[in-house]
Image (tube, rainbow, N blue to C red):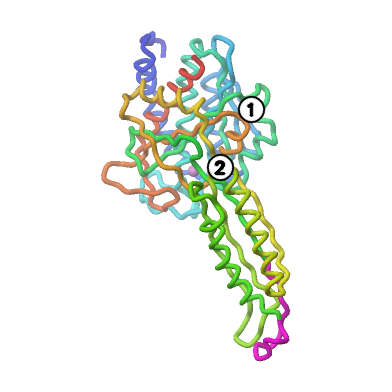
Amino acid sequence: MSTPLPNDPAEAIRRIVADIEPGLIEIRRDIHAHPELGFEEVRTSGVVARELEQLGIPHTRGIGKTGVVGLIEGGRPGPVLAIRADMDALPILEKTGLPFASTVEGKMHACGHDIHTTTLLGVATVLKRLAPSLAGTVKLVFQPAEEGIGGMAAMIADGVMDNPKIDLALGFHNQPGMAAGTFGFVRGPVLAASDRFEIVVRGKSGHAAYPHTVVDPIVAAAHLVTQLQTVVSREVDPMHPAVVTVGMLAGGTTHNIVPDSCVVKGTVRTLHKRARDIAQSAIERLCAGLDASMRTKCEVVYRRGVPALVNDDKMLDPTVAAVRAQFGDDAITQRQPQMGGEDFALMADLVPGFQLWVGSSQPGRRDALHNSAYQPDERCIGFGVQALSRAALEILA
Ligand code: NI
């Protein structure tokens, strides 16, 4: 690490990454072999803390239970840029057959968060070395529990946005639909707000042979499922993508009893706040209408989950320019938004944020996230480190 670096930032970053890449791949395989679920990332956060310690990067553990936050001060004053990676695994039985496959039965890094954690450690190494040329501070955010269990919310509750106050946020996700060495971006909303509803349709139970003596919640719930199909098709602006899916319909015990109630559960995905508000109020109104028309009493619980992740041009433009400067104009392409959710959205809701998509597919493989055989191309770690480090350099120029 003592040889002087070239002045060209692309070459300087490339050289550092070439040095550290084998070590990063070792770290990734170690994390991959020892997956931990949300808020249980004790070993993983220990690996992160150990590496930051070795780099001489001050850090704090226990932010959001198992989260870790590191700080790299630049040579000149400027804004605080957060770069965020998630660390948790999934409850999936791994079927890759790799020599470094999960050693914990029923748990697997099938969303590539092992790749993310390792990539951010690589970024930490590069930016620590290039710190004198940064105008501002980089906050390294290693987040627990991304998979729907509130890791980002916990970190925000523990003050991750403050001290020093985050001004800008950069996130990233590996994408097995894109080749390693390529990158993607989406302008505006990129991932959906993810809400859930639980409706108990209450009627009046009785003998199935005497329908005039009961209030049938099953017939009512069946009507409701059909009516819910009109929320997207008849109420939301067709230019605003939205999904309303009923995932559970449960009621009754046998053929000759009308039950007291029937449960309808589902999810709502939207990319725009207006569509989200319309969907919620429409669901509540249809339930009230059901009560009026079919004599039921619906109890509606609508829970808002993460908001839509909206990429801010203020972060998108310099990041895309940085990727092009590092890899050439063709390395990054515009992609379609997706209806999945991601809790980096909570941070990007507070400050201008952007999520870079890092291609991770191996030549000849057609992998998917959350799949038990997912095998990302490990070269995506080095490529991701280069892209994110260059982006930080451009944003804190
Ligand atoms: Ni993920």
- Residue 109: % across, % down: 46, 45
Between the residue at mark 2 and the residue at mark 1, the CA separation in whole angstroms equals 29 Å
333 on left or right of 262: left
Q: Nearer the viewer, residue 157 or 357?
A: 357
- Residue drawn at 57 percent across, 63 percent down: 228
- Residue drawn at 50 percent across, 17 percent down: 128
The amino acid at mark 2 is Ala
For label 1, being within 8 Å of ligand 1 is answered: no
The amino acid at mark 1 is Thr
Residue 129 drawn above or below residue 188: above
The residue stretch that appears in magenta: 200-214
| Pointer 2 residue | 308
Q: Is residue 40 visible?
A: no
Residue 204 inside the magenta-drawn segment: yes
Question: What quarter of the picture does the N terminus occupy?
Answer: top left
Which of labels 2 and 1 is toward the front? 2
